[in-house]
């Protein structure tokens, strides 16, 4: 019977070093896994906090937007009244202050200009205004209420309410103009 020879001191130390190296490698793998879990949990925590912040701010945003709408409508009502220009400027100033407060809450006001094409999702139709030009059909006639965009992700939180032009045929063209209908 052959008995294996006793390992030398160098071989024992090499085996021990390999064992320590294997242990350190396993430790580093576990540490890397822990770091990845911590990073993932931190990201989830940040997302939850952001969602919580958004839900807490939602009623404030709604109230600020309603305030802006009221100030904007009041300012528009005074347009063309030179004797009330100071009041109109005051309402516009208050509306601008509310717009800045909305921006500080992470929401940006968006508007629509007459003549721009209707964009589904960005605009919502609040009514129609007849227009004789067929090229104007489906374009914005007037903005009724501003929209709101989330500054962080660019999503529309409230579309702009607009009245749209609707092409109509003038009565004279429908009936054949000023010509009398003569039948024998």
Image (cartoon, grey):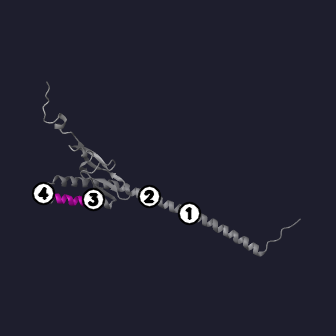
Dominant secondary structure (helix, strand or loop) of the stretch shown in magenta? helix
Q: Residue furthest left?
A: 83
Query: Residue 140 — which label?
Result: none
Farthest residue to the top: give it: 184
Secondary element under disc 1, as helix, strand or loop, is: helix
Would you name the residue on which mark 2 appears? 47
- Magenta stretch, residue numbers: 87-100
Tag of residue 84: 4
**Quarter the C terminus occupies:** top left
Judge from the rendering whether residue 101 lies leftward or rightward of residue 132; answer left or right: right
Q: Earlier in the sequence, mark 4 or mark 2?
A: 2
Visible in this render: residue 164? no
Check disc 3: other Cα within 10 Å, few if <14, some if 14-19, many if 20+.
some
Residues at marks 4 and 3, CA–CA distance in whole angstroms: 23 Å
Spatial distance from mark 3 to mark 2, Cα to Cα?
26 Å
The residue lying at 44 percent from left, 57 percent from top is 48
Query: Which quadrant of the view contains residue 78?
Result: bottom left
Mark 1 residue crowding within 10 angstroms, few (<14) / some (14–19) / many (20+) = few
**Left or right for 136, reference 5:** left
Q: Is residue 78 magenta?
A: no
Which residue is disc 3 drawn over?
99
| N-terminal label among 1 and 3 | 1
Q: Earlier in the sequence, mark 3 or mark 2?
A: 2
Between circles 3 and 2, the one closer to the viewer is 3
Task: Check disc 1 and report the residue beneath it.
Answer: 34
């Amino acid at each position: 019977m052959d008995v294996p020879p006793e390992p030398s001191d160098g071989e024992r130390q090499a085996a021990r070093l390999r064992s320590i190296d294997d242990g350190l490698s396993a430790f580093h793998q576990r540490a890397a896994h822990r770091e990845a879990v911590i990073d993932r949990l931190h990201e989830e925590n940040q997302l939850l906090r952001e969602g919580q912040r958004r839900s807490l701010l939602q009623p404030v945003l709604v109230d600020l937007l309603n305030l802006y709408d009221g100030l904007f409508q009041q300012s528009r009502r005074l347009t063309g009244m030179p004797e009330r220009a100071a009041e109109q400027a005051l309402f516009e100033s208050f509306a601008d202050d509310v717009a800045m407060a909305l921006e500080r809450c992470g929401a940006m006001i968006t508007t629509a200009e007459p003549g721009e094409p209707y964009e589904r999702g960005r605009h919502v139709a609040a009514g129609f205004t007849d227009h004789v030009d067929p090229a104007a059909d489906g374009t914005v006639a007037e903005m009724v209420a501003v929209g709101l965009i989330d500054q962080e992700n660019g999503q529309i939180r409230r579309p702009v309410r607009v009245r749209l032009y609707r092409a109509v045929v003038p009565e004279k063209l429908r009936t054949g103009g000023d010509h009398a209908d003569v039948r024998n």
